[in-house]
Amino acid sequence: MEELITVLGEIKALFNRSLGELSIDCVVFGFHDDQLKVLLLRAKGTDAWSLPGGWIFKTEHLEDAAYRILKERTGLDSIFLQQFHTFGANNRYNGKEIMARLGLPTEHNFFPERAVSIGYYALVEYSLVEPKMDYMTEECRWWDVNEIPELLFDHNEIAARALKALRKQFDNEALGFNLLPEKFTLIELQRLYETILGLEKNKLDRRNFQKKILSYGFLERLEERKTGGAHKAPYLYRFDPEKYATYQHENEV
Amino acid sequence: MEELITVLGEIKALFNRSLGELSIDCVVFGFHDDQLKVLLLRAKGTDAWSLPGGWIFKTEHLEDAAYRILKERTGLDSIFLQQFHTFGANNRYNGKEIMARLGLPTEHNFFPERAVSIGYYALVEYSLVEPKMDYMTEECRWWDVNEIPELLFDHNEIAARALKALRKQFDNEALGFNLLPEKFTLIELQRLYETILGLEKNKLDRRNFQKKILSYGFLERLEERKTGGAHKAPYLYRFDPEKYATYQHENEV
DNA sequence: CACCATTGTGTGATTGTGACACAATGATAA
DNA sequence: TTATCATTGTGTCACAATCACACAATGGTG
């Protein structure tokens, strides 16, 4: 009970620093084991999962708020972030109901009558993330994007839309490298493409894929090869941001 | 002076119905004379132009607010609307400075310290729009998208970003038909594409363009031809939303 | 050291895109 | 009434992009 009072106190303090009706929700994508993953939180003492998110401070730049929230969750501060949609249905959620599901006293309902949430998706390198808790969170872990449970609020819709936005942009921009370690093999890159675009394994022809991706000229082949696999050692490649900038510059309309 | 008091009173009443820090700005596109146009407002007694926009009511759905604002401005209520970005830099504008430019007393500064604006663009059929005034607006008219003057707030940036979003989506979805009358010729459609994509006239090959656009199968050729031009009368075409839905369905991933 | 799954590499077939010409037509002006 | 002229409607060939496909080399495993 005392803990509960502390929690409510912390929430109140947070509110005083925030814009009342405006929040940010982040869909954090990672790639591991040929699966696209999303980072989800479980609130203390409940089985209710949700996206990481938070309120925007009164004097804060929108992007800064998104970075701050992600830093709190993942420990990373240099991540790829992309705003994709703002959600503002006036029936996005029922504050009292949510309070109840969170095991909080409904008479203290701190959710505004109406809230607008700005959706960002983030691309992070899976292995660098250390999921972090806070005073409201009991668990924070990765979920396969195809096995997301029922989430609080309208977060299922937000996640679905983030995935759609990611797929769309993935075609036009070289986003994939944010999800891979610095050095990677072309087959890893191919698996990433297949996974994100929802294709089955080896749907893309290996030779054609490699030819195409290398023709863009912003991948650098290293001398090094990847060892440890049970077979012929493949070359490692590196994404060169400068060459990519050149490429982009040459190919814009 | 009395009028000024009325205006401030109206604004106050509006605020009471609205979410404090959240507004919508609309970039309304129209097509006329082979030019892409944007609808701009000039505030009463000033030379300050801005995008049409407004505050979101407390109980209002985001999309509904955007439709309402456009209805107020253009008289249309069935328009193509697309959310494209949310703007939330914490230095988007200086309230007092804006009050001064609007000729309002700066000690009544009613702008919130910090505001977030959700950007929508609209595609409307030029000839159906009747620009409308309100108590703050003295003039409302179309501007060539290449000759937009300096606007209030960060509206130049918003307009630029809307255009970018439009161009991007224009490639992937059949948006153009929202900007044309119901019946149109293929050469009108071609001019529209060239204008929006920023190409010079006849940059697209007439035969190839027509072949391609007809191959999609969602245009219907009418018996009717367009007369009145000084030359051979071209066929009129109609966009068939049902066939387009079929096309979309078949071509999604 | 034999095995085997995986890597690295090139060519021909198919499809899509871009360039291009000429007869028919409808309003205009003599 | 008719000649003029800009514009419409239509098909083919060249080139570029994409796709399908095979085999020798290699590095760990047993």
Image (cartoon, coloured by chain):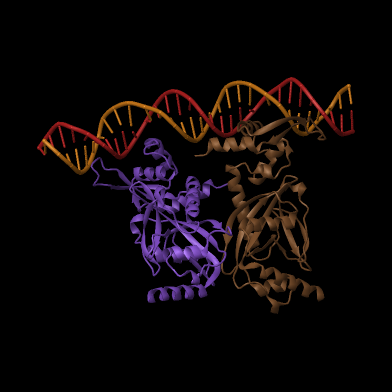
Chain colours: A brown, B purple, C orange, D red
Does residue C20 sit above or below A164 in this rendering?
above
Front-most of residues A161 and A76: A76
Q: Residue at x 70, y 30 (%)?
A: A221
Measured as percent of width and height from the top left, residue D13 is found at 42, 23
Residue extending furthest bottom?
A107
Q: Residue at x 53, y 36 (%)?
A: A251
Does residue A116 sit above or below C22 in this rendering?
below
Q: Is residue A176 left or right of residue B141?
A: right
* Residue A103 in sight in this render: no
- The part of the image, by quadrant, that contains residue A99 is bottom right
* Total numbered labels placed on residues in the image: 0
Front-most of residues A133 and C10: A133
Q: Is residue B234 left or right of residue B86?
A: left
Measured as percent of width and height from the top left, residue A114 is found at 59, 70
Front-most of residues D15 and C13: D15
Does residue B249 sit above or below B79 in this rendering?
above
- The part of the image, by quadrant, that contains residue A95 is bottom right
Front-most of residues B156 and A180: B156
- The part of the image, by quadrant, that contains residue A213 is top right
* Residue A161 in sight in this render: yes
Q: Residue at x 61, y 58 (%)?
A: A62
Measured as percent of width and height from the top left, residue B181 is found at 35, 53
Measured as percent of width and height from the top left, residue A175 is found at 64, 44
